[in-house]
Amino acid sequence: MRSLRLVWIYPDLLSTYGDRGNALVLERRARLRGLPAEIVEVNSDQPVPRDGDIYLMGGGEDLPQTLATDRLTADGGLHAAVSHGAVLFAVCAGYQMLGAEFGGAEDQPVAGLGLLDIRSGRGERRAVGEIVADADPALQVPRLTGFENHQGVTRLGPRARPLARTSLGTGNGDGTEGAYAGRVLGTYLHGPALVRNPGLADLLLTWAAGPLPPMPQQAEELAHRLREERLAAVAAHP
């Protein structure tokens, strides 16, 4: 059986708040089901492989975000992979990069990767703290929990759908959180997002590998215990 290739893009530029954990939890949840998986880390001076199954991008500061966008555009590997059906999951700065443009240093517009129909700029206030959001019912993913730390405001175009609607926190800035289209999905959720939200991790694995075998019961109980702890902590401190 061919291994699932999980491509962690530019950890030297985009790796704030432990976002590498997203790759680790995907690998772990695949292996616990008997599905071989491997993480391929690609730094910004290396070509992006075009044969990955799931590509992951994390958060970053303004200048690394702009540099990463320029290098990914010139490289072309990520665009080629997505055009052939690969899954792409991006967080915070990585999420903003997916769109038509985002606010760079001094909020000057920077052209994005054009992989998702969104536009991002800089809001008046920084959003910092816990976020809780109800996922689009079409995704069949339980309530989402995470941590946000950004000053971005993101607007969705007609070819993108909100990942979720917020009940706590800022997200995109209009009552929605994240966006997706096809197998491209972005979010402001740190935590890491896929550690806190195993249902979202399994959605990405399903997109890449098809229907999944069940998880071992003990491992699933531990994953959901963490999720419930975070939701309970937020409920206790509104």
Image (tube, grey):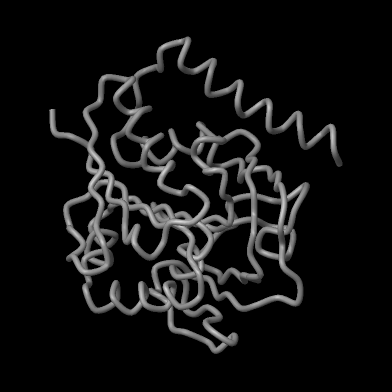
Q: Nearer the viewer, residue 109 or 185?
A: 109
Horizontal side of 223 relative to 169 (left or right) equals left
Q: Is residue 154 left or right of residue 206?
A: right
Quadrant of the drawing holding the N terminus: top left
Residue 60 left/right relative to 137: left
Q: Quadrant of residue 203?
A: top left
Give coordinates of residue 18: x percent, y percent.
48, 47
Q: Residue furthest left?
A: 1
Q: Is residue 69 above or below residue 49?
A: below
**Residue 117 or 10: which is nearer the viewer?**
10
The percent coordinates of residue 193 (x first, y second) are: 53, 43
Q: Where 175 falls versus 75 (above or below)?
A: above
Left or right of 210, for residue 93 = right
The image position of residue 68, as x and y in percent, is: 36, 72
Q: Residue at x 31, y 58 (%)?
A: 9
Quarter of the picture holding the C terminus: top right
**Quadrant location of residue 10?**
bottom left
Q: Is residue 2 above or below residue 184?
A: above
Q: Residue at x 21, y 73 (%)?
A: 75
Q: Position of residue 82 (x, y in %)?
A: 29, 60
Furthest residue toward top: 217
Give the tally of numbered discs. 0
Tell me which residue sits at (39%, 68%) in the image: 115
